[in-house]
Image (tube, rainbow, N blue to C red):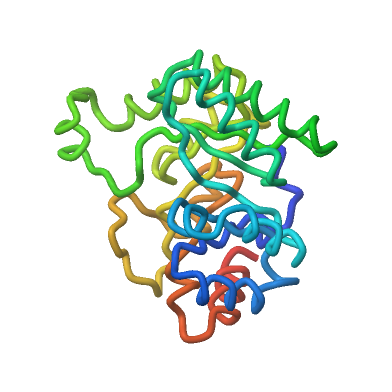
């Protein structure tokens, strides 16, 4: 299926996950400025350095994916999404298992926060099943249906809630694209070039396979951030995609 993202250069759809200590993250961000379009900040960096880090990355020309995975009662999530949007973040996340009312609250909060600073509403994404989880780990949480069915069911809740899209493994991207349509954001972690170590990811694919399966964006962390030359690693991924 053709998507709304096919005309965007593939390298602009690679999100570099700065899941490392602050000095290293800032160094890599400075090195990749002008090459990578997106960076991701997770809980570790944000809880330590807060909005100042987002402002710095925005000043370097990046789009910022703020990955805090909101999961609480709707009132709390509305406020969290509002605050996240007010930082200038371009993409935010919540847990789909929080349910439709919670995700609707997140969308409302994101809209309110963006309006308060005169910016565009950030892309809102629902986390389906973490890419570090396999079937056995999922069943330990009490979910007995197959992984694929769980991901699709949670994505359906995200669609009902009216958020921008989902986060899922590249292995589920093709079925998600068919379900959610060409406009939906389908962001896939668990992406590993053929030359990179698997790490703690269970459900993985190469960058090219993730896009072929229907991903709008891919998230790549350690293959770039742990490389001796992060610029060369990013360039190698971009060349593979081209």
- Count of numbered labels shown in the rendering: 0
The foreground one among 127 and 117 is: 117
- Image coords of residue 74 (percent x, y): 50, 18
Rendering quarter of residue 181: top right
Question: Is residue 168 rendered to the left or right of residue 115?
Answer: left
Q: Residue, x 44% and y 26% (percent of image)?
A: 96
Rendering quarter of residue 58: bottom right
Depicted 63 relative to depicted 22: above or below: above
Q: Residue, x 63% and y 53% (percent of image)?
A: 51
Q: Residue, x 15% and y 38% (percent of image)?
A: 136
Q: Residue, x 32% and y 26% (percent of image)?
A: 150
Residue with the most extreme right position: 118
Screen quadrant of the C terminus: bottom right
- Image coords of residue 84 (percent x, y): 62, 40
- Image coords of residue 35 (percent x, y): 71, 71
- Image coords of residue 191 (percent x, y): 44, 57
Depicted 28 relative to depicted 13: above or below: below
Residue with the most extreme bottom position: 228
Depicted 23 relative to depicted 124: above or below: below
The foreground one among 78 and 28 is: 78
Screen quadrant of the N terminus: top right
Depicted 179 relative to depicted 69: above or below: above
């Amino acid at each position: 299926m053709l998507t709304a993202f096919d005309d965007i250069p593939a390298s602009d759809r690679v999100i570099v996950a700065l899941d490392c200590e602050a000095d290293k993250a800032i160094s890599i961000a400075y090195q990749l400025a002008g090459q990578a379009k997106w960076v991701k900040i997770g809980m570790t960096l944000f809880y330590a350095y807060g909005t100042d880090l987002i402002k710095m990355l925005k000043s370097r020309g990046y789009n910022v994916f703020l990955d805090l995975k909101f999961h609480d009662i709707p009132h709390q999530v509305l406020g969290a999404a509002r605050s996240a949007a007010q930082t200038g973040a371009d993409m935010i996340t919540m847990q789909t298992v929080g349910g439709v009312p919670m995700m609707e609250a997140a969308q409302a909060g994101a809209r309110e926060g963006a309006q308060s600073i005169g910016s565009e509403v950030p892309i809102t994404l629902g986390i389906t099943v973490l890419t570090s989880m396999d079937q056995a780990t999922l069943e330990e949480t009490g979910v007995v249906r197959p992984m694929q069915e769980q991901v699709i069911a949670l994505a359906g809740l995200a669609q009902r809630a009216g958020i921008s899209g989902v986060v899922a493994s590249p292995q589920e991207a093709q079925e998600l694209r068919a379900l959610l349509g060409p406009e939906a954001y389908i962001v896939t972690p668990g992406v590993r070039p053929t030359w990179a170590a698997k790490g703690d990811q269970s459900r993985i694919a190469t960058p090219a396979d993730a896009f072929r399966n229907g991903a709008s964006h891919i998230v790549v962390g350690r293959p770039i951030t742990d490389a001796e030359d992060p610029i060369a690693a990013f360039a190698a991924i971009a060349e593979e995609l081209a």
